[in-house]
Amino acid sequence: MNNRISTGMMFSQSLASMMLRQKQLTTLQQQLASGQKLVTAKDDPVAAGTAVGLDRALAELERFGKNAITVANRLGLQENLLAQAGDSMGRVNDLVVQANNSSLSDDDRRAIAAELRSIHDGLLSLANSTDGSGRYLFGGSADDSAPFSKTAGGIVYNGDQTQRRVEIAPETFVADATPGSEIFMRIRTGDGTVDAHADIGNAGTVVLTDYGRASGGGWNGDAYRIVFTGADTYEVLDDGGNTVGGGTWASGEDIAHGGLRLRLEGEPAIGDAFEIGAAGHRDVFATLRSLIGTLEGDALTVAEKAARQNALQGAMRDVARASEQMIDARAAGGAQLAAIDDAASVREANAVTIEETLSGLRDLDYADALTRYQMESTALQTAQTVFARMQGMSLFDLLR
């Protein structure tokens, strides 16, 4: 078999070699000019696909960062507002203690009531605060309108109980601001577990000074009513009005039944009654309105003064529960802010790792690229020299 080497074939091979070298040289020039190894996806399809995925991961981290900024702003505002609300509740407590001083006149107490009314309105304004972007902080997910409004019956909550969870790092979520219903409305009364109060119509001078669970325990959640049948005797009624106990009593002693106890001081009238049972819920605005009503009314008789003292002491306990609830909400918000700080460190570490990986995929090694550029330039010049010499070659030269 004869193999022919034609002049046309040698020209074609030489030309192809020069074109290949020129293409590689052009690619290296583009890489050197841009500083990138991946000028186009066809340079390395696998690396280009990986880089696109990493770009998306970086964009997601950026989105998480924006989420964190938004929720941190809202939680920071919540912290500030609840701090102000806590200061207001501290002032309320001071005013109630002052109002419970028997040396004050009714006019003095009405002046205290006026300040309490101002605190009530200020607290309502705080509860209807926005986050600066027109969204209400304490409305839950229904944050496009004011969550609290005044009605004839008092303050009502118009938001919902939804607390958003916001993703601030991969698989890391934090809670948004606490719904206002859990801060200002659903506040446990009494000591948070047990509550007790005097009947409004009591005619004696007995004051409820303390109550709670009895040391022996045994309370099953039932409520009881203590009714005085004489100056030193009483009976205990259950929820159905059935007599379930009774005994004798002296001022300053505890009355205990069913795992609960009350400490009463004063002189009862026959028929005076006190109730004790599981703590209910009352909103802070209702507590303030009740206080204001108590202080604005005149107390002329000893029975009215005892009723006022009972109301003030009950209000002090409810104010304490409201303050505790605000402190709890601040603590929960602080925990979320700490989680945001921790997530920022995670995002930063992840971003550094991804950027390093992207740099390895995309960034050009200039030393290597310049070396290859010199080699390709030399190869191209050699191919051009060979091609030029081939143009001068002919079989007729051998016949001479």
Image (cartoon, helix red, strand yellow):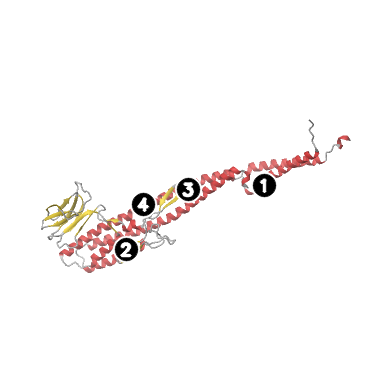
Q: Are marks 1 and 2 in contact (CB under 8 Å)?
A: no
Disc 2 target residue: 155
Report whether 250 appears left or right of 339.
Answer: left
Question: In the image, residue 206 lies at what x, y percent?
Answer: 15, 59
The type of residue carrying mark 1 is: Gln
The type of residue carrying mark 2 is: Ile
- The quadrant the N terminus occupies is top right
Disc 3 target residue: 347
Q: Residue at x 38, y 52 (%)?
A: 334
Q: Residue at x 25, y 58 (%)?
A: 316
Mark 2 or 3: in front is 2
Question: In the image, residue 176 lies at what x, y percent?
Answer: 40, 54
Point out the tag, 1 or 2, that comes first from the N-terminus: 1
Q: Total number of numbered labels?
A: 4
Mark 1 or 2: in front is 2
Q: Residue at x 64, y 46 (%)?
A: 31
**Alpha carbon distance from label 3 to label 4:** 23 Å
Disc 1 target residue: 29
- Residue 398 visible in the snapshot: yes
Q: Secondary structure at mark 2?
A: strand
